[in-house]
Amino acid sequence: MNSIYWVFFIGLLMNIPSLVPVLFLRKASKNVKVSLVFRLFLLNAFLVLSLVTVSQNTTRKYGLFPIWLVITAIVLFVVILLPTVKFMRKHLTVGKSRAVTMSSFLIVYTSRFHSVFLDVNGSEYTLNGYNVVWTLFFMFACLLAYLGCAGSKTYSGSYAPSSASHSDYFKPTKEYETQSQIDYDIAVKGRSVLSDPNLSIVEQRCYRDALENKDEF
């Protein structure tokens, strides 16, 4: 097998551990998990391709890769990132979306740390321009994914509490009824109106005061 294809194949296999965070999404359906695994695999593949091409062309006097490949890798990473983030925001909370994305990216970085930071002789780790650019671009990609996972919609039905509070606020109660309506209820029900379990404390006070005023007269 050609060495280039072999490296490419090995690079794809190294992305498999980055899919482990999806297994911890217990409440997500099977279809959501399968779709998310496929999206994350493509996203991580283009992330690594972007990291490699950008780092190599930035730190070498003569770029190892053609400029069109660098631009294509970055564009494909962004193109895959947008629908992936949108998909996660639809089915997961903001916290879970960020946790899955960041942990997946971190596994990608950790799995390649040895090959990126190892020196030429292979005896110890070293810090050079290549792995610095690799790390900086990786952090920038993480920032894009982190910001993309944010949004007003955190989960399906998340706006229910807000709408419920508004509906309760505008719900008509006897607290805001006219005095004539209170007098009518007392005339019809008498003191039994106080035994209504739906009355609030304020409502009971209004009816009690009205009954006391009626008794005085």
Image: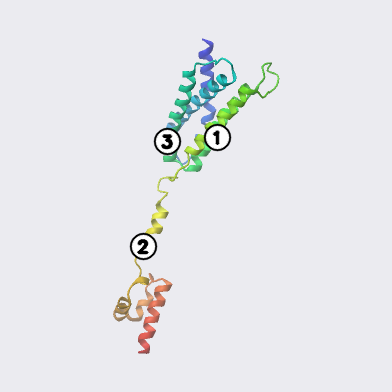
Tell me whether the residue at label 3 lies in contact with that at label 1, contact meaning CB atoms closer than 8 angstroms: no
Q: What element does badge 1 sit on?
A: helix
Q: Mark 2 and mark 1: span between their CA atoms? A: 44 Å
Where is the C terminus found, in terms of image quarters?
Answer: bottom left
Sequence-wise, the earlier of marks 2 and 1 is: 1
Q: Mark 3 points at which residue?
A: 32
Task: In the rendered view, tell whether residue 17 sits above or below residue 86.
Answer: above
Q: What element does badge 3 sit on?
A: helix
Instruction: Identify which amino acid the numbered label 3 is placed on.
Output: Val
Instruction: Identify which amino acid the numbered label 1 is placed on.
Output: Ser
- At a point 56% along the width and 29% down the height, the residue shown is 138
Picture quadrant where residue 184 is located:
bottom left
Q: Mark 3 and mark 1: span between their CA atoms? A: 18 Å
Sequence-wise, the earlier of marks 3 and 1 is: 3
Q: Which of 122 and 63 is in front in this view?
A: 63
Residue 63, percent across and down? 55, 16
Left/right of residue 4 with respect to residue 169 in the rendered view: right
Q: Name the residue under label 1.
A: 103
* Comparing labels 2 and 1, the label whose residue is closer to the camera: 2
Pointer 2 local density, CA inside 10 Å: few below 14, some 14–19, many at least 20: few
Residue 96, percent across and down? 50, 41
Q: Name the residue under label 2.
A: 170
* Comparing labels 3 and 1, the label whose residue is closer to the camera: 1
Residue 8, percent across and down? 51, 17
Q: Mark 3 and mark 2: span between their CA atoms? A: 38 Å
Residue 23 can be seen, yes or no: no
Task: In the rendered view, tell whether residue 108 sits above or below residue 156.
Answer: above
Q: What element does badge 2 sit on?
A: loop
